[in-house]
Amino acid sequence: MQKLSPTVGGLHRVLVIGAGLAGSEAAMFLASHGIHVVLVEGKTLKLNPAQKIPKFAELVCTNSLKSLDPTSAHGLLKSEMKAMGSFIIEAAEKHAVPAGDALAVDRELFSTEITERLRSHPLIRVVELEADDPLKLKQAFECDFVVVATGPLTSKGLEDWILREVSGDDFYFYDAIAPVVDADSLDYSKMYFKDRHKPLGESADYLNAPMNKEQYYAFIEELARAEKVPPKEFEDWKFFESCLPVDLMAERGKDTARFSCMKPIGLEREDGREPWAVVQLRKENLLGSAYNLVGFQTRLTYKEQVRVFRMIPGMEEASFIHLGSCHRNSFLNARKLLENDLSSKKFPEVYFAGQITGVEGYTESASMGLYVAYQILRRIRGEGPVRFPVETAMGALVNYIMTVEKPCPSNINFGLLPTIELTKEQCKAGGRKKARKQLVAARAQDVFQSF
């Protein structure tokens, strides 16, 4: 393996393994602060089962980075990331597609932008290599620190190293991907455009396929009985509760999906009545040439996906651009294995970032890339690690993964931030739940700015 020339002017060099959301964010943050970065990525050599394109920061499961509302937990996290100069949020906003109050992107343009900017940065060297031993790679590339940001599907060699040297056996759970359908293959006479809780007729970003009671229960029955891709003999399905396969919802109960991804609330038809259930479709790109089925992650075999999903009104002749799948995600017991700055307790110069640390979601993963890069920058400058206030979104995420007794990946949500007790007047003014969220969000913004 060819070694790099010595660092210019005594600058430090950081090895980042993985060019997903967290790795891309970490690499750009460090490079933008004058740090040389070696970015190792193996997907250009071989795609894993969940990947579709040989580009960086691929959005595998959905094209949505969730809410932009500054009073929501996801909006709050985005505002903190932007304040730190987030490369990922900048690219997402540049390539956004209509999605109501959410930040959804054209996946191809988003990944292309990130790939080109990382490859062209003068302080970033991209190495196409499937990583295995971070310590050996650190030595080979003459780096001072390592960031392992290998995402939900860590390669076998690196996973073996982590299992052997860092984590022990409990190092995974399962996630699933929703299918994407060709827009030209839909029957729009059976569907309608409407965003939830907004008046019908207004410009809308979501296409809705309504079901009556009979259609819904027939659909659920077929979902439950359809053939699934079985786990391998050595595997055991362990799913993240906020991203359950729709077929698993059907198995849990006939009304489970109707109170989750198929809920009809706020999606009234022209006559003012709510359908019994609704399948929502969201634009996959700016051209509107493809739609993804919102919340329709699945374990169904490809053949069964085509058969069952064509039961959805308007999708009887649907042509699928790609079908859903289920894949294994890797994550650590951060409380046991990592320091608060997400460095390894056993190997202090090795940091972990992104979903592998126990956070769940695109924005959450990217934010941990920023967090780790910031901590490494402080260390390079001779400063100690710093704790982000738990009142902030990023601080709350780190606090969660560092304190939860039974590891379970989590999205950012207001339940992770300290609550605020309301006065009677505040409760009366705008409703207890809404008022508390607004106050928690306002406090988080103030604390983060001061921090």
Image (cartoon, grey):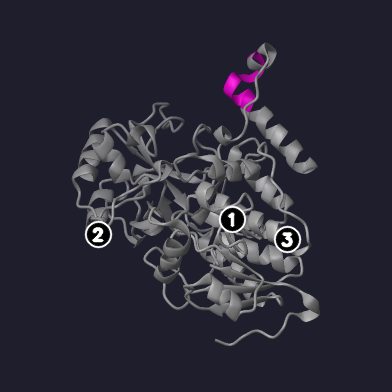
Q: Are marks 2 and 3 in contact (CB under 8 Å)?
A: no
Q: Is residue 358 visible?
A: no
| In contact (CB < 8 Å): disc 1 and disc 2 | no
Residue underneath mark 3: 379
Q: CA distance from mark 3 to mark 1?
A: 20 Å
Residue 306 on image: x %, y %: 26, 55
Comparing labels 1 and 2, the label whose residue is closer to the camera: 2
The residue positioned 62% from the left and 31% from the top of the image is 418
Q: Is residue 228 above or below residue 253?
A: below
For the point 72% across and 83% down, the residue is: 6
Q: In this rendering, is residue 258 above or below 37?
A: above
Lower position in the chain sequence, tag 3 or tag 1:
1
Q: Secondary structure at mark 1?
A: helix
- Left or right of residue 119, residue 272 in this image: left
| Residue 94 within the magenta-colored segment of the rendering | no
Q: Which mark is residue 366?
A: 1
The amino acid type, in three-letter code, at marker 3 is: Arg
For disc 2, the neighbor class at 10 Å (few under 14, some 14 to 19, many from 20) is: few
What residue is pinned by disc 2? 232
